[in-house]
Image: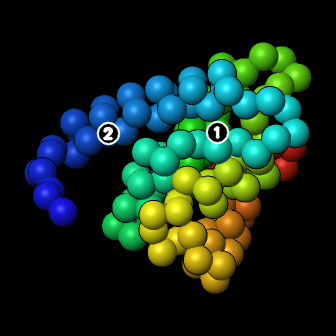
Amino acid sequence: MDSVDVPHRIFEHLLTGFLCDEGADLARFYKDGKVAHPGDAFGSVFAWLWEAHRDIAVASFATLLAEARRRSEEGDEVTLDALIGGLRFALHRSRLAQQEEFEEVERALHFEVPDHFGGRTDL
């Protein structure tokens, strides 16, 4: 796989723009009570981040959830559980889709993401 050196500040800008765009798409296509598939592109980025910078992966997942909730119609907000369920489908190209690996991701997201929302458990 090719790699490109990018200054950290530029990486943050690129990641933020990507997450905002993916969050908008997620909000547009999500219907309450369904699995919230974050898209294969997000799955690829998340898998890479999980291996390279786990804290940034979790923060990116939280940002995606926040952006999708912000852009959702009232009453149709994406939930944490729906997004975690959808993430599994987006990770199909990575080892994180394997049962044991995904269980670790799921536990971490359930535990850490609420901290990004002030400890809220109603996500």
Comparing labels 2 and 1, the label whose residue is closer to the camera: 1
Residue name at image x 63 percent, y 60 percent = 88
For residue 8, side relative to residue 104 (left or right): left
Q: Nearer the viewer, residue 28 or 72?
A: 28
Three-letter amino acid code at the position of disc 1 = Leu
Residue name at image x 83 percent, y 25 percent = 76
Q: Residues within 10 Å of mark 1 (few under 14, many from 20)?
A: many
Give the SS element for disc 1. helix
**Residue at the spot of label 2:** 12
Residue 84 showing in the rendered view: yes
- The answer to whether 39 is drawn above or below residue 67 in the figure is below
Picture disc at residue 100: none
Look at the image and tell me in which quarter the N terminus lies.
bottom left
Residue name at image x 82 percent, y 41 percent = 34
Look at the image and tell me in which quarter the C terminus lies.
top right
Q: Nearer the viewer, residue 25 or 109?
A: 25
Residue lying furthest top: 73
Q: Nearer the viewer, residue 45 or 1?
A: 1
Q: Are marks 2 and 1 in contact (CB under 8 Å)?
A: no
Give the SS element for disc 2. helix
Coloration mode: rainbow
**In which quadrant of the rendered view does residue 56 lie?**
bottom left
Pinpoint residue 122: horizontal percent, then vertical percent: 86, 43
Residue 60 showing in the rendered view: no
Residue name at image x 53 percent, y 43 percent = 39
**Residue at the spot of label 1:** 65
